[in-house]
Image (spheres, rainbow, N blue to C red):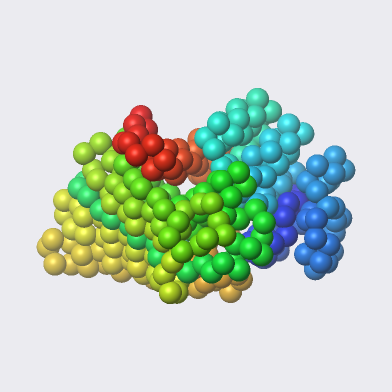
Amino acid sequence: MEYKAAIAGCGGISAVHEDALNTLGIEIAAVCDPVSEKTARFDCAKYEGFEEMLEMGGFDVMHICLPHFLHAPAAIYAMERGVHVLSEKPMATVVADAKEMIATAAAQDVTLGVIFQNRYNTASQLVKSALVSGKLGKVKSGWLKVTWHRDEKYYTESAWRGRWSTEGGGALINQSIHTFDLANYFIGTRPSAVEASIANRAHPSIEVEDVAEGIISYGDIKISFFASTIHPYDAPVELELICENGRASIAGATAVIEYTDGTTETANQEDSAIGKSYWGSSHIRQIEAFYASLSRGEKPEIDGEEAIKTQRLICGIYDSAKSGKRVDLT
């Protein structure tokens, strides 16, 4: 079956979806954005909002590249009309909305996918393969760090950013969520508990956090984390896992595995030609896999049930930070 796609939201990340769809030969039949200048580059039907676009139809899959607070309502509106959905992260701003998305997909017998493209990075695949094969043995502990820079203009130029009701959080749910998702992906089990703190140290115009730290428990495995948007520049994301048979680390686009027997393995991820370099070049890999799963009548690798694991983790960190208590996630 040949699928036709629509893109809801034509901001920066939409260009990556556009490029992937064009590369894969999937027709973009419609786009929507309230700012007409953002849809001008497209040669297809153009609308201001996703509701009108969905009522007019003419496509099978809607790619959601909207502000966070619109991900769930747009996805649900689309799926209720029999349209498959591939949403940018986060799938929602709260767990209840994520659950409703999953329930709607099941009730309407349509496919829901969520973008966590970093799982498809060459570096990530090397580490995952070493864990699945047993070469690294069991994970014993680890840590992750995301230290990027976001100035006041970043928040003030888009009214939805920096607000609990519209962004759902700050440094965690926006800048760091991909790295937390990789922790879930590598360890392979749902986190059992979190204990964390958050603060706004340097952005007086926003409500949400610009720094966060804490511990995630996966049973006996402890993963510490630090996330910040106060750093002077966008430093490479770092993640390290200490395992029975060695140590696996990712720094930016590079993975290095050092085994206890002295051998090493490395992998490097090529840069993306479209969009920001830290987005990587794996959107096309995930989007291709999503459409392949549709063609086979199978669930995508990262469907709603898989994505909600990371949603629960991020929201659990916020719950812990706001309550000042350890939060059970089981």
Residue under the image location 83 percent in, 46 percent down: 53
Q: Quadrant of residue 82?
A: top right
Farthest residue, direction front: 204
Residue 8 seen in render: yes
Left-right relation of 235 to 112: left
Q: Quadrant of residue 285?
A: bottom right
Residue under the image location 62 percent in, 47 percent down: 166
**Frontmost residue, 205 versus 183:** 205
Image position, residue 176 (x, y; %): 45, 56
**Frontmost residue, 189 versus 233:** 233
Image position, residue 193 (x, y; %): 32, 36
Residue under the image location 60 percent in, 62 percent down: 155
Q: Quadrant of the C terminus?
A: top left
Left-right relation of 283 to 267: right
Q: Quadrant of the N terminus?
A: top right
Across the whole image, how many numbered discs are drawn on residues? 0
Residue under the image location 56 percent in, 42 percent down: 93
Q: Is residue 321 above or below residue 96?
A: below
Q: Is residue 108 above or below residue 44?
A: above
